Image: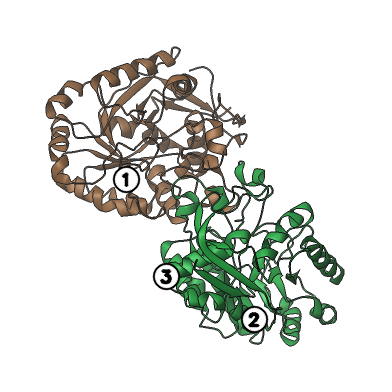
Chain colours: A brown, B green
Amino acid sequence: MKTHTLLMPLDMHLHLRDGIMLENIAPLSAFSFSGAVVMPNLVPPITTLEEVKAYKQRIIAAVPNDYFEPYMTLFYKNYSKAFLKSVVEEIIAIKLYPAGITTNSEGGVSSFDIEEMRPTLEAMSELNIPLCVHGETDGFVMDREAEFMSIYELLATSFPNLKIIMEHITTKAAVDMLDKHDNLYATITVHHLLFTLDDVVGGMMMPHNFCKPIAKRPEDLDALLSVALEAHPKVMFGSDSAPHPQDKKENCGCAAGVFSAPIALQLLCEIFEQYDRLDNLQAFVSDNAQNIYGICPEFKEVILEKRPFVIPNIYANVVPMYAEQALNWAIADIE
Amino acid sequence: MKTHTLLMPLDMHLHLRDGIMLENIAPLSAFSFSGAVVMPNLVPPITTLEEVKAYKQRIIAAVPNDYFEPYMTLFYKNYSKAFLKSVVEEIIAIKLYPAGITTNSEGGVSSFDIEEMRPTLEAMSELNIPLCVHGETDGFVMDREAEFMSIYELLATSFPNLKIIMEHITTKAAVDMLDKHDNLYATITVHHLLFTLDDVVGGMMMPHNFCKPIAKRPEDLDALLSVALEAHPKVMFGSDSAPHPQDKKENCGCAAGVFSAPIALQLLCEIFEQYDRLDNLQAFVSDNAQNIYGICPEFKEVILEKRPFVIPNIYANVVPMYAEQALNWAIADIE
């Protein structure tokens, strides 16, 4: 049987939620990945050292059987340098949300007043804390990310020593930004390497493929594929796996978020094999992230086997992406 | 109380379905409108004189209390001139669907081979039977209508005496076609005068706003509004009201179609009043259609009253557009 081994795969953008949901889904990420950057958009969002530590403990308690490193983040607001110094050892990054732009982001940034943000962003630069950004304006849904590029440029040029991660990019416009500014990086999800808007509303309406940012046009998909498949050194895998209970997805007014964590590596193997770029997958799912963030996860080997695998129709009460579809790659039970 | 009177309002694109659904919804259209062009995409589609007559009788039987003229259509396939002569008095138009492009369109046209279609389309030209077209390719969802413009041009130039109705147009590209070819006309829905893609997937996913063609970009909405509000003489109102049972809309993989028939005139009053163009509404909802199709409905007066009206959350088992929202215009109970 053909196999493909990944060392220390990392999910650089993950929603683990809290409570029962956390307990149900965290083991699925821990089975596939060495670690994950854990988003702070709980209710209320994570903004204190105590909350970071307590959430990290809850995550670790939820994954008793696997080595799994939760790389913690704070929810961006203006913080003092003294506070940032006190928390720098406990976090990997700070996540910025424009206010109201996605799930639990109501307390986010409502205007990009650089002078108001300067003390925080300069302190982050000095302390080498990366800024992760959900880059969307409140404009027309297909334009929100492209419209945000001017804000990325403003941030990148105003704070040249700040590492800025353009999270879950979905457009050619964002791909084109990567080589324009040294301090801009990006994560890409697996679903944005597979979907366009056609997969959301092109045939029937597909709530389990609905996320923010929404999947865009075919030429955007092509641009994302090209930098992912070449494992562009400024690009990392981040699933943005975002579970919601089945009834919140399948009823009228469904919530945004694709649940992909348990099948992400299998799908990535399929995609990279299809384009004959399997050799680049290691860099995309781990090495680039280690270089960009300067992290060294403990040794962990995840072996993918080329054998039929049918995605479950549900994990606990969460319907995964591609539920019940057959894949060609599965994760070996032994590690 | 301010009122606005419409004479013989017409819905030039309506799905009345069949059976119980027909019985439930036809009276709602008959209450608001003098008549409607009834789409033939039943299962199986309407393709014979007998089916046209029988369906018309079922419609009339479903609206015992109102004057309401069902203008019948055939489902396009290649027909002989002899057949078309036999049916011409019973139909107002023939509706062409690209195969598989929307609800119950599987038997539609799978390639636009003009020579293969020529005998039918020439016979239609000679018999003055308009061709109504669902103009979408099978391309990317936001481009499907714009990509179809070359087929409209081919049809318009190949059959200069054929009246071609671009049904439920949604793009600036289609608006721009109106003045390019004498024999191209269009219907516009009320929801496409209100929605962009933002209303479908911009916030939460809104299944009751999901239809084909899907609502497009803000500049498309502006173009549609401009020709509707001026009551461009080649433009008619056609609701494309397309009921589905609630469970088919609100479950995973929801069907395409907005149910607007019972609230269309009220919404149109709101829109035209908002832009101070109420005087043009009569032309948009009746006079233009009478001129284009050469029809003379019996006298019927529908009085809109400016008073609060809350849209029901459901009509029978069908959730309407804007369910439970408050409008400023209602239809008077007396006629």
Contact check, label 1 and label 3, Cβ < 8 Å: no
Looking at the rendered structure, whether the residues under marks 1 and 2 are on a common chain is answered as no
Give the labeled residue for mark 2.
B290
Helix, strand or loop at label 2? It is helix
Q: Please state which amino acid type lies under the numbered disc 2.
A: Gln
Vertical comparison of B193 with B234: above or below: above
Mark 1 sits on what residue? A135
Chain for disc number 3 = B
SS for callout 1: loop
* Three-letter code for the amino acid on which mark 3 is drawn: Tyr
Upstream in sequence: badge 3 or badge 2 = 3
- Crowding at mark 3 (Cα within 10 Å: few <14, some 14-19, many 20+): few
- Residue A203 placement (x, y as % from top left): 60, 52
Tell me the quarter of the picture where residue A114 sits: top left
Measuring 32% from the left and 16% from the top, which residue is drawn there?
Answer: A54
Vertical arrangement, residue B268 with respect to residue A78, above or below: below
Residue B248 rendering spot, x and y as whole percentages: 66, 46
Does B159 sit left or right of A117 as displayed? right
Answer left or right for A207 relative to A186: right
Placement of A294 over or under A103, stated as above or below: above
Give percent across and percent down for residue B194: 48, 61
